[in-house]
Amino acid sequence: MGKKKKKGVGKKHLNPVLTVALFIFLGVLFTVTTSVSKFQKASSATPKPSILGVLSKPKTSIQKTARKQVPAIPQSYGKSVNVPILYYHYIGTNGNPEDVARDNLSVAPDKFDEQMAYIAKNGYNVITLDTLYAALQGNVTLPPKPVVLSFDDGYIDFYVNAYPVLKKYGFHATSFIPTGLINQGYYLTWAQIKEMDSAGLISFQAHSVNHLNMPSLSSEQIRYEVNQSKKELEAQIGHPVNFFSYPYGASNEEAWKAVKDAGFAGAVGTWYGSIQSEGNIFDMPRIKIPGGLSITDFASKI
């Protein structure tokens, strides 16, 4: 006779409801664990900066910009005179059509001659920066309709194209020289500078050593660019250099002080205006003469 199975012996059966709940719980746990693992891997591969780090970097940059890189314009006060200081860069055609910026800075030789003829025929009197300074000091009386001619950067086309026209009309002019760039590439040579200086029409003044943006430099660099350019130019031409032109027209109070401490009588910027005063003597405004200017527009500027 076969043995009968005892009740309760054999496989135990789980409650169906509990089984379903258990599977749901395990599924959720697996999903959460996988998500956390992926997040940790992504975080370790690309570390995220802290909130403090994100906020602190721009703050440092802004402080540096505000302190060193923001140009300033001086206030006008004291004795003042209305004297337009015109400034040019290239006197020549642009050999590179893709250089759009140079188009704006290049005045064709025939246009330059036309502008100088207009000055000569319409009662203007070309004066030097030394005469302007003397007027602000109350030492001289300016002639009617005074105007100053200035040229930045010391390009060789000043010697080739501008100088003959200035001689033609007997006009004095100021050429601002970056001393560290002379005798290089498209710049004047010291021999050309000395030749023009000895003739008496052209006054050569300082335009820094390396043509750098002054407000972006350290205090030591500013003093070097100012002091060394004066020292080198005076050594080359053999007489005092009294005026400074800020590269790119950019300056601030620190640059003004450096120029004054170096023994300059004054300096020029590129901010627009014609009112020269005791207050802005170390950053006098000028009027840019761009390329392509009609004679009517030129007349309106002076």
Image (cartoon, grey):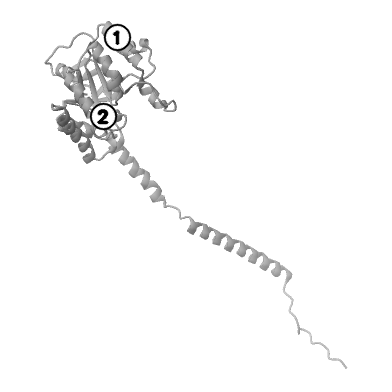
Q: How many residues crowd mark 2 within 10 Å: few (<14), some (14–19), many (20+)?
A: many
Residue beneath disc 2? 246
Q: Nearer the viewer, mark 1 or mark 2?
A: 1
Cβ atoms under marks 1 and 2 closer than 8 Å: no
Judge by depth and name the residue closer to the eye, 94 or 190: 190
Up the image or down, 14 lies above or below 46; here it is below
Q: Residue furthest left?
A: 139
In this rendering, the answer to whether 117 lies above or below 30 is above
Secondary structure of the residue carrying numbered label 1: helix
Among all residues in the image, which is located at the extreme right? 1
Q: Indicate which disc, 1 or 2, sits on the residue closer to the N terminus.
A: 1
Whether residue 267 can be seen here:
no
Observer-nearest residue: 19 or 215?
A: 215
Location of mark 1 (residue): 117
- The x and y percentages for residue 95 are 40, 25
Look at the numbered disc 2 and give the secondary structure of its residue.
Answer: loop
Mark 1 surroundings within 10 Å by alpha-carbon count, few (fewer than 14), some (14 through 19), many (20 or more)? some
The quadrant in which residue 172 appears is top left
Q: Is residue 27 left or right of residue 116?
A: right
- Residue 25 in picture, x, y percent from top left: 64, 65
Q: Is residue 41 visible?
A: yes
Q: Left or right? Give the position of 128 relative to 101.
A: left
Residue 268 x %, y %: 24, 25
Tag 1: amino acid? Ala
Residue at point 20%, 33% (across, down)? 229
Check disc 2 and give the amino acid type. Answer: Tyr
